[in-house]
Amino acid sequence: MSDASEPIDAATVVVAKDGANGVEVLMLRRNSKIYFGGMWVFPGGRVDPEDRLDTRTVSVCDDSDGRGFYAAAIREAHEEAGIDLTEATLHHFAHWLPPAVRPKRFSTQFFLAKAPDNLDVAIDHGEITEHHWMTPNEALLRRSAGEIEIVTPTFCTLNWLRSFGSVDEACVSIQHPECFHTHIKEVAGDDPGMVAFYDGDVAYESLDLDAEGPRRRCYMLKSDWWWEEHSGDPSKNS
């Protein structure tokens, strides 16, 4: 019997377009009766055995051979939202891995794709119950107001995308996938919640919130969520 925390390979694709107010991304709401129920997510899911037949590989920062992720991203976009990405360029920008303490976790490769012209989204009304195009800022504001629920990788991806004026600008910025292998700390007190640390943070191993040095972490507290990243050198962080 395999370890319950053994990660499951998965792929997610952020389908984006240029709208009147900037970049817009397709958000899907998952059925409340399934895993991540009720959450607003990007199209995606686990890598199926037939996806491994795809000879394309991605550069990975774990033990995977990198096969099947492109195929899974394309397949899931079609199954969940009726989107044909077979001719689209998928830009591999991140790998997310939750901490080993989770009973079920997905080792997920994230891609960014420009939405095909004249796209007509058609959700499956099974796993996916709603869809909506949102700017990253709109999605983050709706999360903060309690109108929608999202998970940490979605939050951090939206936070990253909010800095770009166009989809092409975001795509060009991607040089290699960023690795987000999570170490996590529970925070108590007046503002409880969780803090997730990533490689490059001074407290990645120690989980010492007050350690001085580089920061690369996500705060998910009762009051609000935010991303913090800097070198730790005050002269370079201003």
Image: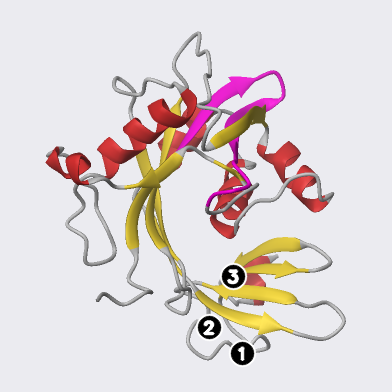
Element class at badge 2: loop
Q: Residue 61 versus residue 83: which sits nearer the camera? A: 83
Q: Image check: 228 left or right of 202? A: right
Residue 196 is drawn in which quadrant?
bottom right
**Residue 174 visible in this rendered orientation of the protein:** no
Kindly state the secondary structure of the residue where label 3 is placed. Answer: strand
Quarter of the rendering containing residue 40: top right
Q: Residue at x 17, y 44 (%)?
A: 52
Residue 112: x %, y % from top left: 43, 37
N-terminal of the pair, mark 2 or mark 1, is 2
The residues colored magenta run 13-34
Residue 151 against residue 51 in the figure, above or below = below
Q: As shown in the figure, which amino acid type bears the numbered disc 1?
A: Asp
Q: Is residue 234 left or right of residue 74?
A: right
According to the image, label 2 marks what residue?
A: 202
Which numbered dot is residue 208?
1
Residue 238 falls in image quadrant? bottom right
Judge the density around disc 2: few (<14), some (14-19), many (≥20) Cα neighbours within 10 Å.
many
- Magenta: predominant secondary structure element? strand
The answer to which of 55 and 211 lies nearer the viewer is 55
Labels 2 and 3 touching (C-beta < 8 A)? no
The residue that mark 3 highlights is 217
Instruction: Measure the alpha-carbon separation of dots 2 and 1.
Output: 8 Å
